[in-house]
Amino acid sequence: MQTIIALIPAFPLLGFFILAFFGKKMSKTVSGTIGAGSIGIAMLLAFWAGYQYLHNLSDVKSYSAVAWHWISSGNLNVDISFRLDALSLIFTLVITFVGFLIHVYSNEYMADDVDFNRFFTYMNLFVTSMLLLVLADNYLLMYLGWEGVGLCSYLLIGFWYKDPANGYAGRKAFIYTRTGDVALMLGIIILFVHFGTLNIQSVAHLAGGKWAIGSSIAVITAFLLFVGAISKSAQMPMQPWLIDAMAGPTPVSALLHSSTMVTAGVYLIARNHALFALAPSIMTLVAIVGAVTLVVSGFSGLAHHDIKKILAYSTVSQIGYMFLALGVGAWSAAIFHFMVQAFFKALLFLGAGALILAMNQEHNIFKMGGLRKKMPVVFYTYVAGAASLSAVPLITAGFYSKDAIIWYSYASPTGSFWLWILAIVGALLTTLYSFRMVFITFYGKMNTEPVYKPKNLIKVPLIILAFLSIFGGLVDFPDTLAHFHPFTSFMNHTLPVFTPDKSAHLEGWFELISAAVVLVGIYLSYVFFVQKRDAAEAFTETKLNKFFENGWGFDTVYDVLIVKPVEWFSKIDQRDFLDYINVGIARVSLRFSRLLSVTQNGKLRWYLMSLTVGIVLILTYMIYK
């Protein structure tokens, strides 16, 4: 078992090295096969590890694997070692399975790209880094994976770097997430100073006995981890970078949003639940930030016309639901929604990629239309994804994951009526923008004739993900007699048991309200975006719509408060005394260089004369010494 765990990240890493060193000499078929195949092998190993874990669950709750000893210095002892428990297993299965489907899809989507080999090189490193992050049993190795996904996001968002806008988007993502990386690093340093170890489980066991609930050091540490989480997961006020990240190829967006980068913050909080439990004020902050983010992003998603940016705002919103669940202590519900969201979000992005290919790289949904008969597979699978994203009652996986979070936002001991209101408003907005995409893109008159028909490498991943988007929720389907949730019970082997403290008889009424909101949202979407499509299109030009479309002006605020002052200070500081010292040293070095270059003029007689003079001077010195 230990060997299998260590091999899961090893195969994607091996694929990365092969592609990095030999990819230029390979054909696209070979490099694409290596890229997807290495992830496929990791997926099979992950499923085998999952089978073994479940088979022995009654006896062993976690497995550890040490690959080799890494650092040993004083009190610091760190290994390249991994831990497989219920939490890391779910993340590992999702990362490898969804990552494999996206790699298969990419073989067709990127077939005509001149940098095909470079694309798969980066994608394999991306998956490797995320696997290191979730399997690491110590903070230093986890931080290595954390920085790895940050590096890969920069490389892949700016993949088409010849367009300056794409390079800017990559740098924007890199700078935004660096803020959280510094906060996380400081939090890890505090943990090491106080507990003398970087082992995650050891810190979790020691923290409760050493830190009191609500103590300042616990609050500070949890806050630093929280800042790291919101920067990676694009939660308010750190969300603007994820929208510009749509500059990368669509498969990158699918991987980024479904199972890697932006879910890292969710994993970080869930993995450190013992630390966050010691800081109730930070837990409340996590819930509030998640609830506000899901509503703010929902309005922006409803206002945008770019299909990928609508889905980007959707991701920010769905991660907001996960943060809301984490903040009220519904740990398993957050992870369940992560799993389901990975299915329907990968499906929607890959479906959007198929549409973009067919529309000759057109992203504007209002320039599409009438495509349901021309692209039936994309249409039906996209509807399945939109329905799951909207949490259509009973028949979609999204209903079982999101509905639980909405209920817990009220029923939790730390929940409230206002958190529930925000969750319900977010559910309505989600349904509106989800079916707005469906109705505008696939219904009405055809504005652009498709120029490409997807082949099997695109269709098959869409069909598989559509199936899971509908039926994936059944892994936590409750037995109404015993009220038993298999997924939740499984996750409770790693995460704390969550028990709502408010009247259980209200749950049914809350579920009916949630279901009614979704159905009303679908009806309103049909009215506004099918029957009154011209009015909906005209509304996109209003100032209110532009405000929401531009992300509530966050970029403008940051530009005024941060970017412009930094530019101003750099201009007035460009001729300070330190610059004169550096320039002076450079000029002196240049003078000496020019003086020495005189002796290297290429004239033989000059070299002979210099040699003769040198010999005469040396002999003279030796004689008269």
Image (tube, rainbow, N blue to C red):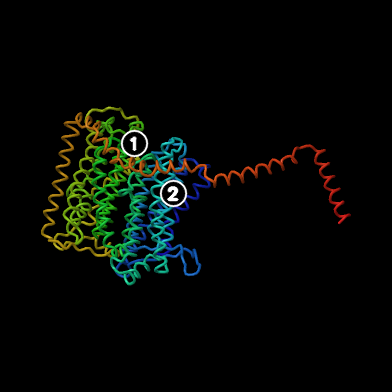
Q: Nearer the viewer, residue 606 or 104?
A: 606
- The residue that disc 2 covers is 151
Residue 425, x across and y down, in percent: 19, 46
Tell me the quadrant of the picture where the C terminus can be found: bottom right
- The answer to which quarter of the image holds residue 160 is top left
Three-letter amino acid code at the position of disc 2? Leu
Q: Is residue 333 left or right of residue 198?
A: left
Q: Is residue 600 left or right of residue 101?
A: right
- The secondary element bearing badge 1 is classed as loop
Q: Nearer the viewer, residue 379 or 146?
A: 146
Q: Residues within 10 Å of mark 2 (few under 14, many from 20)?
A: some
Q: Is residue 457 visible?
A: no
Give the mark count.
2
Instruction: Give the CA distance from mark 1 to mark 2.
Output: 31 Å
Residue 213, x across and y down, in percent: 28, 67
* Label 1 vs label 2, nearer the camera: 2
- The residue that disc 1 covers is 454
> Residue most toward the bottom?
209
Residue 219, x across and y down, in percent: 31, 62
Q: Is residue 192 left or right of residue 216?
A: right
Q: Earlier in the sequence, mark 1 or mark 2?
A: 2
Tell me what residue is drawn at x 13 percent, y 60 percent: 504
Tell me what residue is drawn at x 30 percent, y 40 percent: 553
Q: Residues within 10 Å of mark 1 (few under 14, many from 20)?
A: some
- The answer to which quarter of the image holds residue 58 is bottom left
Q: Is residue 518 visible?
A: yes
